[in-house]
Amino acid sequence: MGLGLVSPLTWAAESAPFELSGPALRITVTRGREVLPIAQVPTLAEGDKLSIKADLPEDQGARFVMLSAFLRGATNPPPKDWIGTAETWKKKAKDNSLTLTVPKGARQMTLFLVPDTGGAEGAISDAVRGKPGEFIRATQELNQASLDRSRLDAFMAAIRAQENSHPEYLRSVAPALARSLSMKLNEECLSKVVELQASCLLDNRASLVLSDVHSSSLTETLTGAPTDLALQLSSTREAGAGFYSPYIAVVRDVAKIFGAFSNPEFDYLPTLGLRRGEGLSLLLNAAPSFQKPKSVLVIGMPAIEADSPPRLRSGAAGPICAARPGVVLPVEGAPLIYSTAYARQMMVRLTAAGGQTLDLPVEPRADRGGYVLQGGEPLAEPFRGSVKGHLFGQWGFERFEGPDFELQLPGMSGWKPVGDAPALVVGRDNALTLAGEAPACVESVIIRQGEAPPQSLGWKVQGSDKLALTLPLVDRQPGDIRLEIKYQGVATPSVLALQAYAQASRLDRLRIHAGDTTATLSGQRLDQVEAVELAGMRLLPDGLTRDGTVDRLRLTTKGEGAPLKVGDKAAARVRLRDGRSASLTAVVEDPRPRVTLLSKSITPGAGAALTLPGEDVLPDDGRLVFSVRAEQGGALRPGDAIEVAAEQGEGKSVRLSSGSHWRLSAPGVGIATLDAGLLAPSAGPLHFRLVRGAEAGDWQPLVTLARLPHIEAVTCAQESCTIKGRDLFLIDAVASAPSFHKATPVAQGFTGSSLSVSAPQDGKLYIRLRDAGSVPVVLRTAPAG
């Protein structure tokens, strides 16, 4: 079959949306003894049996021939017996439908509907066997576009439902829908009047769908000339798609995919398939032609590969209260659970502390951002307090394992302070931590004292059994205090009686080290300290902490005073906010240990595929060796240690003490060895300090700890490369030049196992990591074949 130029009709339809209703099919898939409708089948497998029948009206005027083709590789044409036909107008089922078994070695399946003209079967068979690669790519694109269209339809339906019933809720529902279905949300629409919000949100539908990181990576689209199709990356800013999905690219460019194998007799017309149960309804972006060139409807079927259920992540920041019906188990990472029927029979299994289990059904709700627990019956006593919840079900024919949650229900136990009885002091705010069960279900906390009006308090849940409170006792009197902690759905609150005391200011000790610009004042009621004057210096408060009943006030110097030497006794004047002052003598202590970083070297983990520049990025499987020198001619001691921690947040810290991790090479020089795995799961900039007994030096920058993706293979064609591996979500962007011009971004939360990027000119791909964005790393590629 010769290849001809694409027809004007097809090119005219290039930018048309898929809005024309086409024919429909009814498809079921049998695997073993289980039969599923096509809407519940994400992928096919070798040995699957398919039953395919055209669902045409009884008065159908045009006769259609239905063809199926199994494909096994871009360079490996399928055998002729992998192509089947059915004449849809025939009366007998064996003639008008297809009963197929997925053959061994098949990787893709395509369906065709073509007007009966005689000879069409042979022409299409020759086209498929002549250029199987184009049909493989076209099928992949159409299948992906159909999935993206399902998310668009789900978003539009949910918005319209709110518009018709509760338009005032769009302001809160629309962002949840956008996150759940991975849609682009125009925030400006939510500032409009209620009547205009829905139409604004649905405007310009071609740019609403964002990339689904489970079902697609950055997809390559065929856009080549009729005689030589080239692979190009369509999901790039330069191609007009930005971060948007292949659906947008297909709407714009899909006609070009078929230009390579159209001819004067036949035009290949792409379709999107909307799956509902056994039905596969087709959407067209151009009206089919029953005159030459006649339209061949091309239908993408699921890939033939192992099922890969999405890796759902829990979106819960802590325990979830299940005291009321309709509790939401927030999940992230899989828009298709809301827009398709792939995930089915979803349940959450509750496991109590005593080992008892209970399975409860859940329903996906994109407008609420997760699975909603069904059923409103109270749970039995063993499931009170904290229980483990595990989400599971089926993904197609396979079992689907979701994330774990911690669910809580109020029990009968009360609340009590953590540790010793708290010494609450009036005249200031007091931090208080309470222990009890089901803190996630606390609905309100009220403080009462005497005849004073009750006051509502804020709180934070800590872990699975604690509440952190701040008691506002600035304007209260000493005496009895009551805290009323009320649970959701429980009428009577739990009452906790406490005692507040009066406490006078007390100054215990002022500590300052030689050479320091900070000091520490200990005592009580140090929140009243305004400033401390010492040896011509003025020290101002810079953070108050409480250690049991003792306040510790950090002071920072403002201005320069007389130099202080070890052993000097300096008189300090402590000025309070109320105008009073008090005297205190400070003895200048030994300098705090200080070191200077001399050098460092990084050894990457075994088998690392990425080349790290310089010595500023430590891979999470690597080792850092660095040396330090004691300042001011000091000496390091055998009992000294090096502490390393993340600069930001509350990540893990590591102390490197004498032994293999810390050795002295000279009286004033030490060598530290840090295995990056000791800091897992921390990431980002690290800093270090020298620790000597109870004293520690100042923090100093060290390196940036970066989690690396596991690169398994890089394959390149003339214009593109495919990166395969695990944990690719750790990549922020990939470029073919160190300037990151025309870089390919990787979506947040990407869970795919491959990325498609433009091929480099010098055999190097440049990767910007999420943990170390300012320092690109290098990935070498094999030359194009």
Image (cartoon, rainbow, N blue to C red):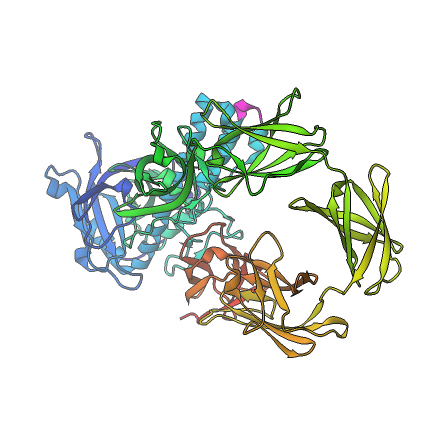
Residue 295 location (% of width, % of height): 29, 44
Q: Can residue 285 be seen in this view?
A: no
Instruction: Please give the count of numbered marks on the rendered protein.
Output: 0
Say which of 164 and 415 sits in front. 415
Residue 767 location (% of width, % of height): 53, 62
Does residue 557 belong to the magenta stretch?
no
Task: Identify which residue is drawn at 70% across, 61% down.
Answer: 698
- Compared across the picture, whether 620 is left or right of 138 comes to right
Which quadrant would residue 153 be assigned to in this image? top left
Which quadrant would residue 696 be assigned to in this image? bottom right
Magenta residues span 192-196
Q: Can residue 434 be seen in this view?
A: yes
Q: Furthest-top residue in view? A: 451
Say which of 521 and 36 sits in front. 521
- Type of secondary structure dominating the magenta stretch: helix
Task: Identify which residue is drawn at 33% across, 52% down.
Answer: 308
Task: Identify which residue is drawn at 39% across, 59% down.
Answer: 229
- Where's the C terminus, which quadrant? bottom left
Which quadrant would residue 688 be assigned to in this image? bottom right
- Compared across the picture, whether 722 is left or right of 520 comes to left
Residue 2 location (% of width, % of height): 29, 57
Residue 260 location (% of width, % of height): 35, 55
Say which of 520 and 71 sits in front. 520
Does residue 193 belong to the magenta stretch?
yes
Say which of 219 and 172 sits in front. 172
